[in-house]
Image (cartoon, grey):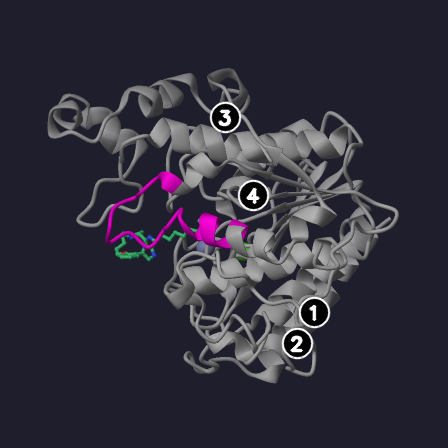
Amino acid sequence: QLGIERPQGYTVSFHYNPKVEQHHFGSKHPMKPWRLQLTKQLVFGYGLHYAMDLNESLPAEHRDLAEFHDNDYLNFLQYIKSDDQTQKRHQEELNRYVFTDEFNDCPIFDGIWDYVTLCTGATLEAAHALSSGESNIAISWSGGLHHAKKRQASGFCYVNDIVLAIQHLLQSYTRVLYIDIDVHHGDGVEAAFFNTDRVMTLSYHKYGEFFPGTGGPDDSGPKGFEEPGAYFSLNVPLEDGIDDSDYGWLFRKVTGKTIEVFKPEAIVLQCGADSLGGDRLGKFNLNIKAHGSCVEYVKSRNLPLLMLGGGGYTPRNVARTWCHETAVACNVQLGSDDGRASSIEIPNFVPYRAAFEGAGNGNGLLYPELNIRKLQHPKTYTREDLENTAARCLEQLRHIEG
Ligand code: ZLV
Ligand code: CA
Ligand code: ZN
């Protein structure tokens, strides 16, 4: 069917539950769970399901989430409702667990418990597929919710599926590397593993007047002399407008050295698609191909790999990116490098067809430049800034070498 075959020598598994897609954060909220339906339809439309093990995952249970989160916080997520009466009654908890400003990053919506347990269920099942040896690459696009804290929701994230997955992987692997290419700093994951040298966190993100405000150049782990975890948080703060070649150069240099010195036994890659050009919230200028080549680079190390979603606020580009990265995982090429039409056409049952104008039949998945308006955000850095950033990262890595 469509000429899509399983990759040779390894297994990719795809973990999802279509019920996640039905949830709504509210009409004005930029986080749109339906982008996952768009992604899945594109993945299936291209026939990539023939190349993978498909798993419709079960929701995680309270006790799974309690491996990281506070019980009182989880109880709150379980009983809180969106109606005014319940909200009034629980005003104190609302203030404590989710910020309720003028605009609420983490609104209480109907079915919130189902949403968080479904997202986490897919990621935990994916982590298990790796640790059990069933698969070599496991994908959970509904996961990657890197801001959630032990007892607090933050930045559209309520439950930190990444922390829970890494905790699971630590039962089978000595060292786990976490890499985060979302445009935001992976603060929740960094905080959870701040004091251990078994998990190294590496986040690339916009820094400076940008959420969540952490992940600056000196944020490298605990500062105490010979504290476990010192130097095991690596941050790559970046400026507006970074493009394919600069990002790609830095990513390879820093990620390559990190893998060389840390010697992970498994890798968790958060593939937040808000680092693309044209994203509603992001400020970078990456194209899908460059974003995907980061995935390709990590995959080439042949370590057990957990691929997660995350941010991404221009849904048509999120779906294209994650479909392309699913294909990368499966060693399938969907678009052609020269910009010619893909030989595989997106079938008619792709929903929201209008959203795919120009991306569908005839143009292939990757071209023409994905409707991403390049240089929407002008560059605010120089070559020298870039080299300084790289040098500082390599300097930090010298501390954990050997
Ligand atoms: O992609 O904001 O800037 C993973 C992820 O990394 C803020 N939140 C908070 C902190 C102080 N503000 C208060 C509220 C924001 C005010 C207006 C918006 C209004 C409409 C649409 C979007 C936003 C918005 N909120 C843009 N950036 C924020 C961030 C949270 C970003 C979370 C990224 C999550 C899934
Ligand atoms: Ca990041
Ligand atoms: Zn983000």
Q: CA distance from mark 2 to mark 4?
A: 24 Å
In the image, which is nearer the foreground, mark 3 or mark 4?
A: 3
Q: Earlier in the sequence, mark 2 or mark 3?
A: 3
Dot 1 falls on a residue whose secondary structure is helix
Answer with left or right where residue 188 lies relative to residue 236: left
Q: Which residues are magenta?
A: 22-40
The reply to whether the C-beta atoms of the residues labelled 2 and 1 are less than 8 Å apart is yes
Q: CA distance from mark 3 to mark 4?
A: 25 Å
Give the amino acid at mark 1.
Ala
Quickly name the residue at label 1.
391
Which amino acid is tagged 3?
A: Pro
Q: In the rendered image, is residue 401 in sight?
A: yes
Question: Residue at point 58% right, 35% down?
Answer: 123
Task: Tell me, for residue 59, which label it has, or none.
Answer: 3
Question: Which of disc 1 and disc 3 is earlier in sequence?
Answer: 3
In the image, residue 298 sits, relative to residue 360, either above or below, namely above
Q: Which residue is mark 2?
A: 387
Question: Of the residues under marks 2 and 4, which one precedes in the sequence?
Answer: 4
In this view, the residue in front, 248 or 3, is 3
What is the x, y in percent for residue 3?
75, 59
Reply yes or no: does residue 52 show up in magenta. Answer: no
Q: For ligand 2, which image quadrant applies? A: bottom right
Measured Cα–Cα span from mark 2 to mark 1: 6 Å
Q: Is residue 110 above or below residue 140?
A: above
Q: Is the residue marked by circle 4 packed among few (<14), some (14-19), or many (20+) residues within 10 Å?
A: many
- Nearer to us: label 3 or label 1: 3
Indicate the secondary structure of the residue bearing disc 4.
Answer: helix
Label 3 neighbour load within 10 Å: few <14, some 14-19, many 20+: many
- Where does label 4 land, which residue? 190
